[in-house]
Image (spheres, rainbow, N blue to C red):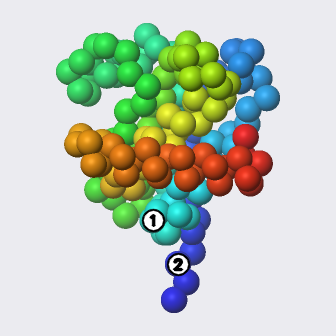
Amino acid sequence: MTIENSIDVCITQNAPLHSYVEFKNCSDDQFSAIIALCFEVYAPQHTSIELCFMSEKEHCVAHKTFLGDATPTDVMAFPYADDDCAGELLVNIEMAVRRAPEFSHSAVAELMLYVVHGTLHLIGFDDHSAADTEKMRTAEKKIITLAIERDIF
């Protein structure tokens, strides 16, 4: 039996990516493709995802509102108990720009990692224990490697 792996991604840019020089060559298609890749590898199904890029200020407000913590974070994932939509990702683009040099990679690679990490949470991965964190990191590396091989970014 073949499961059609079709992922619809609705992207909102509260903080427009093109206003950051680091993301001037990024397209919505790249983010849709890496989300679809996560589902292809770990949870083949037809679903949709809501992806919202936010400034750090907006992200901190959302973090406080939804999770009771006003400190900056990279990505928040909100899984939905809905057959039509797997969930929503709120991504802090300014943190990606700021943190990328710490890991010696581009802001685009850092932002893609946030999207992958959040998507894996929607699929069911967790990172609350050391063992779960190891599984999450292994899955992240696998997706990023495949994304590079497929020229997604």
Q: Height in image: 132 above or below 16?
A: below
Q: Height in image: 109 above or below 49?
A: above
Image-based side of 147 in relation to 120, left or right = right
Using the rendered image of the protein, determine whether residue 151 is visible from the camera's viewpoint. Answer: yes
Report x, y in % for residue 84. 42, 61
Could you say which disc has been placed on residue 78 in the image? none
The residue mark sitting in front, 2 or 1, is 1
The quarter of the picture where residue 107 lies is top right
Q: Nearest the camera: 78 or 10?
A: 78
Amino acid found under the numbered disc labelled 2: Ile
Report x, y in % for residue 89. 44, 38
Report x, y in % for residue 68. 20, 21
- Label 2 vs label 1: CA separation? 10 Å
* Residue density around tag 2, few if under 14, some if 14–19, many if 20 or more, within 10 Å: few
Image-based side of 85 in relation to 152, left or right = left
Q: Which residue is mark 2?
A: 3
Report x, y in % for residue 105. 65, 25
The quarter of the picture where residue 97 lies is top right
Q: Check the picture and name the quadrant holding the C terminus.
A: top right
Amino acid found under the numbered disc labelled 1: Ala
Residue depicted at 53% across the width and 63% down the height: 41
Q: How many marks?
A: 2
Residue depicted at 37% across the width and 39% down the height: 77
* Residue density around tag 1, few if under 14, some if 14–19, many if 20 or more, within 10 Å: some
